[in-house]
Image: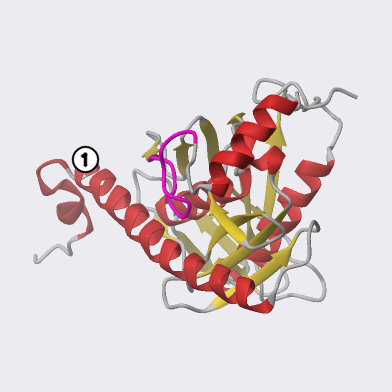
């Protein structure tokens, strides 16, 4: 099985010595993200996130299906990740790595189990017809901090997606095309985002948004998932050195502040995309009721 190229002893010593002096190789502060570029595709539900040299593409797809027998009033929401050799030579096609398994589980807890999306709103006919929503995250380039990039991409894609409008006639469900009716946005209950903190110097120094080289030199990771209201949805300590309670509290404070910044960035990107699509006020005209 191929492995990620490890930094040399000289590289590792240089990175660690620089961090002891609160210096990062790209000139950022310890608690700063790299430049984030968020763009959307021509279709609804496609989000492209570039976090430095890390690049992730998220796509939302929906189909009609039967609900689970024990959840007759809930739709289905699943998250999948695809790590290809194009992103890193350590990834293989058709073979799930530990990185992919951990990434999928953390995204599952952060976005699905935190009830970011109202699955009840996906129900059309109880016990018979529901929407099955799938968020697929493609890793295009890997330069560290995949979790935060994937979380931003999936959440932005969910807010951008528009699901086809439907009409229920007895036991029949009619799905309307875009020409017949405008598709409708998803019912989002809140917007949780992940912030990963990387620990150095025995768990005493915290670094946000590490590059791949920094990530390979770190001594542990702490993932905090929260929303803009300061509600913490998840705290995951991914092995490594033990962390003091005060360090974890600091991680939570840093994460909540960063989540507010990321939420604002996503909202602005969605606003720009909506303005681009709304040429000459066309969307308002299409959605307005006919006064006659």
Find residue 254 and report its horizontal and vertical position in percent: 48, 66
- Give the quadrant of residue 94: top right
Q: Determine whether 285 is above or below 90 in the image.
A: below
Q: Quadrant of the N terminus?
A: top right
4 to the left or right of 268? right
Chain part drawn in magenta: 25-37
Compare residues 17 and 258 and report the one nearer the observer: 17
- Give the quadrant of residue 56: top right
Find residue 113 and report its horizontal and vertical position in percent: 68, 70
Q: Determine whether 277 is above or below 134 in the image.
A: above
Compare residues 235 and 254 and report the one nearer the observer: 254
Q: Is residue 28 magenta?
A: yes
Which residue does the numbered mark 1 point to in the structure image?
276
Compare residues 71 and 214 and report the one nearer the observer: 214
Please indicate, yes or no, whether residue 114 appears anywhere in the rendered image.
no
Find residue 204 and report its horizontal and vertical position in percent: 64, 63
Q: Residue at 56% of width from left, 45% of height from top?
A: 19
Which secondary structure lies at badge 1? helix
Disc 1 crowd rating (10 Å Cα; few below 14, some 14-19, many 20+) is few
276 to the left or right of 112? left
Q: Determine whether 64 is above or below 178 in the image.
A: below
Q: Is residue 128 magenta?
A: no
Find residue 5 and report its horizontal and vertical position in percent: 75, 23
Main SS, magenta residues: loop
């Amino acid at each position: 099985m191929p492995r990620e190229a490890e930094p040399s002893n000289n590289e590792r010593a240089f990175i660690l010595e620089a961090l002891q002096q609160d210096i990062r190789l790209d000139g950022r502060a310890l608690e700063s993200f790299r430049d984030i570029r968020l763009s959307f595709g021509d279709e609804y539900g496609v989000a492209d996130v570039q976090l430095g040299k890390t690049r992730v593409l998220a796509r939302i797809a929906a189909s009609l299906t039967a609900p689970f027998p024990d959840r007759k009033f809930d739709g289905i929401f699943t998250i999948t990740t695809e790590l290809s050799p194009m992103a890193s030579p350590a990834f293989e096609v058709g073979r799930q790595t530990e990185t992919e398994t951990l990434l999928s589980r953390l995204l599952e807890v952060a976005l699905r189990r935190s009830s970011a999306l109202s699955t009840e709103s996906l129900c059309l006919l109880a016990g018979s017809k529901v929407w099955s929503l799938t968020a697929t995250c493609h890793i295009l380039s890997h330069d560290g901090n995949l979790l935060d990039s994937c979380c931003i991409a999936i959440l932005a894609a969910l807010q951008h997606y528009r699901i086809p409008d439907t009409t229920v006639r007895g036991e029949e469900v009619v799905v309307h095309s875009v020409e017949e009716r405008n598709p409708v946005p998803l019912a989002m209950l809140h917007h949780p985002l992940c912030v990963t903190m990387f620990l150095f110097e025995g768990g005493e120094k915290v670094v946000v948004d590490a590059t791949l080289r920094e990530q390979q030199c770190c001594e542990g990771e702490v993932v905090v998932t929260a929303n803009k209201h300061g509600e913490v949805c998840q705290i995951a300590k991914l092995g490594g050195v033990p962390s003091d309670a005060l360090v974890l509290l600091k991680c939570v404070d840093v994460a909540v502040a960063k989540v507010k910044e990321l939420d604002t960035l996503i909202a602005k990107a969605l606003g720009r995309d909506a303005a681009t699509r709304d040429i000459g006020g066309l969307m308002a005209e299409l959605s307005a009721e006919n006064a006659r």
